Amino acid sequence: MVGFMKKDIAMIKSNFKLIGILLVIYVLMGLLGQMDISFILPFMIVMIMISTFSYDDYNKWDAYSISLPNGRKNSVMSKYITTILMILVTSIITIILSFIISYIKTSTINYEQILITMLGTIFGTLLVLTFMYPVIYKFGLEKARIAIFVIVFGLVIIGGFLFKYVDLSNIGKSLTFLENYLVIILIVITIVMVYVSYKISNNIFSKKEF
Amino acid sequence: MENILEVKNLCKKYDNFELKNITFSLPKGMIMGFIGENGAGKTTTIKAILDIIKSYSGEIKIFGLDNRKYESKIKEDIGVVLDDMFFPEILTPNDIDNAMRGIYKNWDSKMFYDYLKEFSLLPNQQIKTFSKGMRKKLEIVTALSHHPKLLILDEPTSGLDPVARAEITQIFQSILEKEDCSILLSSHITTDLEHIADYITFISNGEIVLSKTTDELLDNYGIVKCREKEFRSIAKKDYIKYIKTKYEYEVLVENKKDFKAKYNIAVIDKITLDDLMVLMIKGEE
């Protein structure tokens, strides 16, 4: 497994410069402007991880990886763990920088605000992973792009329809009791959803023929 | 003799192609040349052995163990070069070494770097900057550097110039001298195999046509070249296939000596694997 992860990390190495530039932009925007773009780094790293699928595909790594010990299993697990690891690392970096920026600007650190924002970001990035990876394993990256477009488009339409024609205010009120447990609920949902996504991808890949 | 690889009754059906009852075995310490025309089923057979395709019937044993049940244990001791399948080309040999250390228990970094040096492959250069020959060499070096007991090589010399091919053939020979290793080597460049293969297994249109030692094949089989009148005098059971060329008949016989004793036809040539393939595939019965 470790070997497969090292391969995936080596593949995104060349993007570290871009990450560095984004970090600088983030710090500058944080210090100068009002806009909060703390989501950018974790989302960027997910996009970069997704791009590794196209390199894998180009050189038929997936087929080759099966010839290696435990290749079918490790190949998929490595993609998930590497991505999650990278999301966590970039999130932690962002959190630390946000603390520093917050301190420089206001002489205090707005812990709660920053941590809630980052938790939302982590949830969002893992949501992308949860939906994208099984689709990529099933259809390949090219077709997955279209599939994701359709899914997002569908969600937007359904969402818009709900907001326009359904009165959601009551539901909102009845959900307030959840707020106290929001963090725990979010974490549990995230873990379950990523686990299910991994199981699906693993199942798809374990049957795949090349 | 102990068999390193045994394939029994392997069948796999596609819409437009079928592997039919593929059966052969590779004894320990030997090189088997796996030959056949393009699309004959060489790569499909190799993919089945490696579990890259799954839905097939039949039995495959490697090191005496079932290839699916003991997959990870078996694969620790197999080195592979597959046609057009490898690490992503944005990686460097350094990255490969780093990854492989976490993949194979027996990965030998020193051996890997020694080979890289021997073949003038730069460790910190991306694979995409390598020429086709260099890339193949890197694939072979990668396959060798964990002391495999079985090498499975699918077309390792295709698309290479004669110099690179000779170099690569030499690597295989030296590996066999140094290591306790057996090789299954598929190729349609049969001249490479005549020099190094102990066994030849010939697959055509999804079926095994023959599987014999190279010596048996090259010493016994022959091509009789004769006129039509002479050809008519040959009994059907005494030849395998024939081709009619512009001036003469070329007739494939299984045993040159027996044929000579029976018929008074002067020209019986030694056979090459290329001749054998052409006659077997294109010839008439």
Image (cartoon, coloured by chain):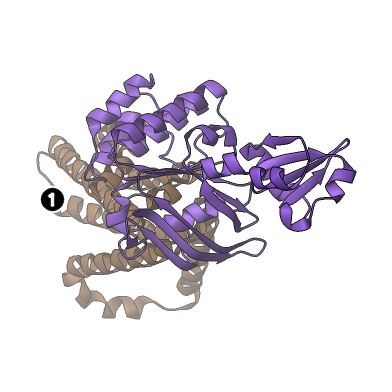
Q: Is residue A140 above or below residue B126?
A: below
Residue nearer the viewer, A153 or B119: B119
Residue at 17% from the left image edge and 68% from the top image edge: A184
Asked if residue A94 can be seen in this view, the reply is yes
User: How far from the left and from the top, in percent, is residue A95?
Assistant: 19, 45
Q: Residue at x 78, y 41 (%)?
A: B264
Q: Which residue is mark 1?
A: A111
Relative image position of residue B252 (x, y in whole percent): 71, 46
Residue placed at 50% from the left, 71% from the top? A158
Choose top left, top right, bottom left or bottom right for residue A169: bottom left
Say which of B74 and B249 sits in front: B249
Q: Chain of mark 1?
A: A
Q: Colour of chain A?
A: brown
Q: Position of residue B82 (x, y in %)?
A: 47, 43
Colour that chain B carries in the picture: purple
Residue at the extreme left = A108
